Amino acid sequence: MWVFDATPLIYLAKTERLGEVVRSLDDEAAMPAEVHEEVVEVGVAKGYPDAGRVAQHVEDGLFEVLETNDSPLSARLNENDSLSDADVAVLVRASENDGIAVTDEEYSRDVASTERITTRGTSFLVLRLVERGDIEGDEARAIIDAMIDDGWYCSSSAYAKIVGKIESPEN
């Protein structure tokens, strides 16, 4: 199971590629209820077009919305003031389902590594489309550039690595 945090949902929806990315996955896609509230409920109420796109994908059945259960892991992670409720929910649901946490938050990824939870980010999902032959490299770069133009943060060194992988997918 691929468990999505807010940032990948928002920026893939802004570029209108969220559906394509989710349909390319080899397993179910989900988001915790906390992420759904943050992205869909609040976003739709504020009139954000990307929130409407995410809501439509939920309605179409591309995402399951998951409730987070109390567990020793959730109790431990909730003690960490640097993680939001949504961050905790993503990590807990990924762990509970032997899944992958899809997050771009560096701190969440560090915590996930400590907890032995596999993570992937938005750029990984775009690069995966290239590797599968679903899109060409120039289209992947256009998606990454559009996300950056829309406010997605990517350091210059990370951008260089992404572009390098787009230009030489075997690396």
Image (cartoon, rainbow, N blue to C red):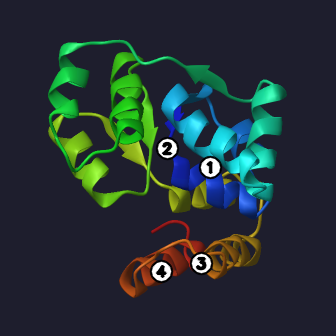
Q: Residue 49, image x and y in percent?
A: 80, 57
Circle 1 is placed at which residue position?
Answer: 9
**Along the polypeptide, which appears first: circle 3 or circle 2?**
2
Q: Residue at x 39, y 30 (%)?
A: 89
Circle 4 is placed at which residue position?
Answer: 159
Circle 2 is placed at which residue position?
Answer: 5
- Secondary structure of residue under mark 1: helix
| Residue 61 seen by the camera | yes
Structural distance between the alpha carbons of marks 3 and 1: 14 Å
Structural distance between the alpha carbons of marks 4 and 3: 10 Å
**Along the polypeptide, which appears first: circle 4 or circle 1?**
1
Q: Are marks 4 and 3 in contact (CB under 8 Å)?
A: yes
Residue that lies at the very extreme toward the front in this rendered image: 45
Asked if residue 106 lies left or right of residue 68, the reply is left
**Along the polypeptide, which appears first: circle 4 or circle 2?**
2
Q: Are marks 2 and 1 in contact (CB under 8 Å)?
A: yes
Circle 3 is placed at which residue position?
Answer: 148
Q: Quadrant of residue 99?
A: top left
**Along the polypeptide, which appears first: circle 4 or circle 3?**
3
Callout 3 environment at 10 Å: few (<14), some (14 to 19), or many (20+)? some
| Residue 133 seen by the camera | no
Q: Residue at x 55, y 68 (%)?
A: 169
